[in-house]
């Protein structure tokens, strides 16, 4: 068993390339991966499998990294807009996929995608934020969502579910939600009261996601607890919420971490990729 393999996720090693997959999504033949740091061509602070296009890494390296993963997964078409910690979710289909082709570096601010058309992959990048995959097991529809703390507060994941319900008649009880590696409560800390109020003004159940250290000043926020609570309030079944038990800040040998980069004084940072694609034979 590889390092991160568990009942929920599979840690895959293919040559130098490493990535994670959710076992429940593999059950439905959903092509997907959450990349680790190794197996790419980027150098320096971006070593090696970097997908961040807004930093100082050579874009040729990023595109080569994408090709490596596309070949591994057997996908051809990857779409992405410009992430900006918004709550914007769009439908990607055969009508607009060319516009959002990864290589075109589309500048439209988008942090979530819903796809029904087959053989169109979407990509979101993370480096402490939550990568969230939402799959409708009955309708064969998938959402790929980037949710940092701003996205959690603004409930971008609920926006994605609402689009699935409105446009494709998804039933939340049929949804499987997979939350990948991200910064966890052990490392998501602050002493700023104004920052805490961004959460407490929205989520009232503070006893469940807010905790203090012995100094009574440093507090920890559990984004996973908030996500699970809000998803269940949206009628997603608790048994259908799968969380990879991995903190990106605690595991910087394998995952990129924005917080780690800032704390070490680096001027830039790299990101992992979460890529998802449905196919004709997904539903079982």
Image (spheres, grey):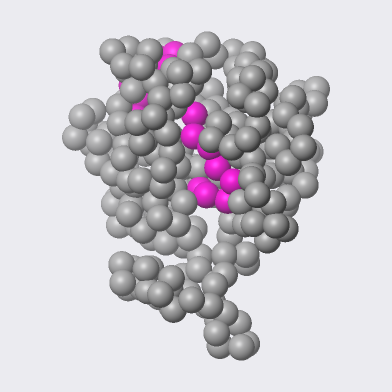
Say how many tags the image has: 0
Q: Is residue 49 above or below residue 215?
A: above
Taking 19 as reference, is 77 left or right? left
* Residue 251: x %, y % from top left: 72, 52
Q: Is residue 99 visible?
A: yes
Q: Quadrant of the C terminus?
A: top left
Asked if the magenta segment contains residue 117, the reply would be yes
Q: Is residue 164 above or below residue 68?
A: below
Front one among 105 and 234? 105
* Residue 200: x %, y % from top left: 36, 73
Q: Is residue 240 above or below residue 119?
A: below
Which quadrant holds residue 8?
top right
Front one among 90 and 8? 90
Residue at 62% x, 64% y is: 187
Residue at 30% x, 57% y is: 233
Spot the residue most to the bottom: 215
Taking 278 as reference, is 136 left or right? left
Q: Is residue 19 above or below residue 223?
A: above
Q: Quadrant of the N terminus?
A: top right
Asked if the magenta segment contains residue 97, the reply would be no
Specify the segment rendered in magenta.
Answer: 114-130
Residue at 48% x, 76% y is: 192
């Amino acid at each position: 068993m590889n390092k991160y393999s568990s009942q929920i996720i599979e840690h895959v090693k293919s040559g130098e390339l490493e990535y994670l997959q959710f076992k429940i999504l593999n059950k439905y033949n959903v092509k997907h991966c959450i990349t680790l740091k190794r197996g790419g061509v980027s150098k320096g602070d971006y070593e090696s499998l970097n997908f961040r296009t807004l930093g100082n890494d050579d874009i040729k390296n990023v595109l080569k990294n994408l090709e490596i993963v596309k070949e591994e997964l057997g996908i051809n078409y990857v779409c992405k807009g410009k992430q900006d910690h918004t709550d914007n979710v769009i439908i990607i289909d055969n009508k607009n996929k060319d516009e959002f082709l990864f290589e075109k570096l589309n500048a439209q601010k988008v942090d979530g995608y819903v796809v029904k058309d087959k053989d169109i992959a979407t990509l979101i990048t993370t480096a402490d934020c939550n990568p969230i995959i939402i799959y409708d097991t009955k309708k064969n529809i998938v959402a790929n969502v980037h949710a940092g703390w701003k996205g959690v507060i603004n409930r971008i994941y609920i926006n994605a579910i609402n689009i699935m319900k409105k446009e494709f008649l998804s039933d939340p009880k049929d949804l499987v939600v997979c939350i990948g590696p991200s910064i966890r409560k052990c490392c998501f800390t602050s002493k700023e009261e104004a920052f805490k109020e961004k959460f407490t003004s929205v989520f009232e159940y503070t006893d469940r996601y807010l905790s203090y250290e012995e100094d009574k000043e440093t507090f920890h926020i559990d984004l996973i607890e908030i996500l699970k609570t809000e998803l269940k309030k949206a009628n997603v079944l608790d048994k259908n919420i799968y969380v990879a038990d991995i903190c990106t800040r605690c595991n910087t040998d394998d995952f990129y971490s924005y917080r780690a980069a800032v704390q070490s004084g680096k001027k830039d940072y790299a990101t992992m990729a979460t890529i998802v694609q449905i196919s004709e034979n997904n539903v079982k």
